[in-house]
Amino acid sequence: MQIIEAEQVHRVLRFEELIPAIQAAFEGTFGAPRRNVYPLDEGASHGDAFAVLPVWTDRAIAVKAFTYFPSNPERGHERLHSKILMFDRATGVPTAVVNGTSVTFWRTAAVSAAAADHLAPTGARVLLVCGTGNLAPYMAAAHMSVRPIERVGVWGRDPERARRTCEQIRARRPDVAVDVVDDLRSATGEADLISCATGSPQPLIFGDWVRPGTHIDLVGNHERTQRECDSDLVVRARVFVDSRANVMNEAGEILLPIAEDRIGEDHVLAELSELCRGVHPGRVSEAEVTLFKSVGTALSDLVGAQLVMDKLREHASGADVEAPPAR
């Protein structure tokens, strides 16, 4: 059984391969029960947590398990630790343990880009990234791989972290103009595509800030009582999700407007598998506002881990693997 570490994941993954692989997987047949997140601190709103995400396809079975300990940085540890355990579908034999934290960066961004390929304006040239955490450069790179982005704005509460995020994005795409954003409202009104990957408990993007034709991508929140945008934006937008089962269990962006009687559950028009299969056409006009809410799916973890295994196998057989892209 292979033990695959983060360095190997980053060395072989490319969005140009991962995004089509994710689209193909969501188009196909798979089993993915609702993920289970277990609070470890009773009564705490943001305490330690443990989660399990199972999934299977006709090729593989996978279980991602992760821990989230928000106070870990104070003790010199990362907040999140994750592993993906892979099994062969035909025999049930374990095949690999893959570093799940690194795969999560890649697959989260790739899922958003797969959705944007169906929902963002085809001529989208201005991207706004909200957030300066580890995920932000991946979100920018993934969206730039599916749309002709010419300018990227990065907004964050810490200007120095925003500058560092800009540098990481420029290192990968020196042909694109990348700058720190100070005025979030103004930048929102200028963007064709907005990607939020923040830990904000309160809305950052508001419905009356967004111009017609914009696509909004929300990945940062996994809490029922929090959200990265206000209810007005959700009411105004045509809404799509990665997984109805998971979003309707975790995402305040959708659950809070439902609780306010602003929308019903049918306001979610389709999930990613329906977009990939052509069951729903996605964007149908240049003027509409579209919104994609993602909380994470085990299928994308399986796809990312399987692609890493395949690429490492190619490399071991003598195929060339390029140097890792700048992140």
Image (cartoon, grey):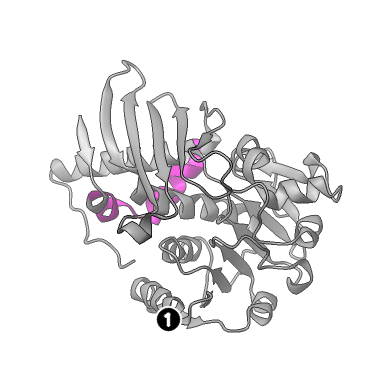
Residue drawn at (83%, 48%), measured in percent from left and top?
A: 263
The range drawn in magenta is 8-25
> Residue 86: image x %, image y %?
33, 30
What residue is shown with label 1?
A: 160
In reply to whether residue 171 is colored magenta, the answer given is: no
> Measuring 20% from the left and 34% from the top, which residue is drawn there?
2
Pick the front one: 159 or 186: 159
x, y (%) of residue 131? 51, 68
User: x, y percentage for residue 92?
Assistant: 32, 17
Extreme residue in the top direction? 91
Viewer-closest of 77 and 24 = 77
- Looking at the image, which is closer to me, 36 or 47? 47
Q: Is residue 230 left or right of residue 148?
A: right
Residue 151 coordinates in the image, percent (x, y): 52, 78
Residue at coordinates 52% horizontally, 36% vertically from top-left? Answer: 37
Quadrant assignment, res 165: bottom left
Question: For residue 125, what is the image quadrant?
Answer: bottom right
Question: At 48% across and 38% down in the image, what residue appears?
Answer: 40
| Figure quadrant of the N terminus | top left
Left or right of 200, for residue 238: right
In the rendered image, the quadrant that contains the C terminus is bottom left
Q: Check the image and report above or below for 128 versus 258.
A: below
> Which amino acid, mark 1?
Glu
Q: Is residue 33 left or right of residue 324?
A: right
Residue 215 drawn above or below residue 58: below
- Kindly report the secondary structure that dominates the magenta region of the rendered protein: helix
Mark 1 lies on a secondary structure that is: helix
